[in-house]
């Protein structure tokens, strides 16, 4: 069964301690109107978007054989706060495009190592707010997170 949310514009999740992921890969395609995503104090959250069929020891299965790029066309704001076990937004190899993305806040997420394993496109993102202050984004998002690991 595939859940679809074509009219969803705002998602705020706070204090869901047993939550391990927010969306599955197949759900993301229906999030065409999602503009604002805020997640905080979810102690067991490891990824925001989980790959289909993902097993705990095997995180590199492909999302869907026909999908080359995952797009969140309207997502402009993402706030991640106090997510102690968050490893990344999406750990798949597919390209990830967020064309309207202009606000990113990552605070107290010490386990994050990468946004996604695939190419990430965020043309409107200029500044990232982290636990260590505000940073201008002069490189791609994955490179930024790798260079600031432990500070976010």
Image (cartoon, rainbow, N blue to C red):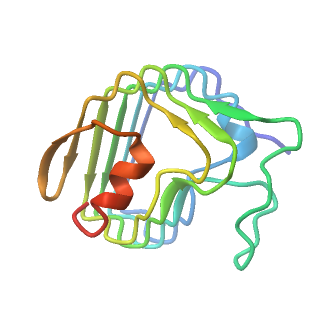
Foreground residue, 95 or 88?
A: 95
Tell me if residue 11 comes above or below residue 110 in the rendering.
Answer: above
Residue visible at 43% across and 64% down? Answer: 113
Q: Residue at x 73, y 63 (%)?
A: 60
| Residue 142, x across and y down, in percent | 44, 49
Q: Is residue 69 left or right of residue 107?
A: right
Quarter of the image for the N terminus: give it: top right
Q: Residue at x 49, y 58 (%)?
A: 88
Q: Position of residue 130 (x, y in %)?
A: 20, 52
| Quadrant of res 95 | top right
Question: Does residue 57 appear left or right of residue 14 in this picture?
Answer: right
Residue extending farthest left: 133
Viewer-side residue, 97 vs 48 = 97
Report the side of 48 relative to 53 (left or right): left
Measured along the vertical axis of the image, is residue 106 above or below residue 55?
above
Q: In the figure, 116 relative to 101: above or below?
A: below
Give the camera-side residue of 99 and 28.
99
Picture residue at 38% right of the left edge, 60% below the top? 146
Q: Quadrant of residue 32?
A: top right
User: Looking at the image, which residue sits at the far bottom?
Assistant: 57
Percent position (x, y) of residue 15? 36, 62
Total marks drawn?
0
Tell me the quadrant of the picture where the C terminus can be found.
Answer: bottom left
């Amino acid at each position: 069964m595939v859940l679809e949310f074509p009219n969803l514009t705002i998602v705020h999740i706070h204090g869901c301690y047993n939550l391990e992921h927010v969306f599955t890969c197949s759900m993301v395609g229906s999030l065409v109107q999602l503009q604002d995503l805020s997640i905080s104090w979810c102690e067991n959250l490891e990824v925001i978007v989980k790959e289909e069929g993902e097993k705990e020891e095997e995180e590199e299965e492909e999302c869907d054989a026909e999908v080359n790029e995952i797009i969140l066309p309207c997502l402009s704001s993402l706030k991640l706060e106090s997510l102690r076990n968050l490893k990344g937004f999406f750990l798949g190899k597919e390209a990830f495009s967020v064309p309207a993305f202009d606000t990113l806040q990552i605070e107290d997420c010490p386990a994050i190592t990468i946004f996604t394993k695939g190419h990430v496109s965020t043309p409107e993102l200029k500044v990232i707010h982290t636990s260590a202050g505000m940073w201008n984004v002069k490189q791609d998002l994955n490179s930024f997170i790798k260079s600031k690991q432990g500070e976010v």
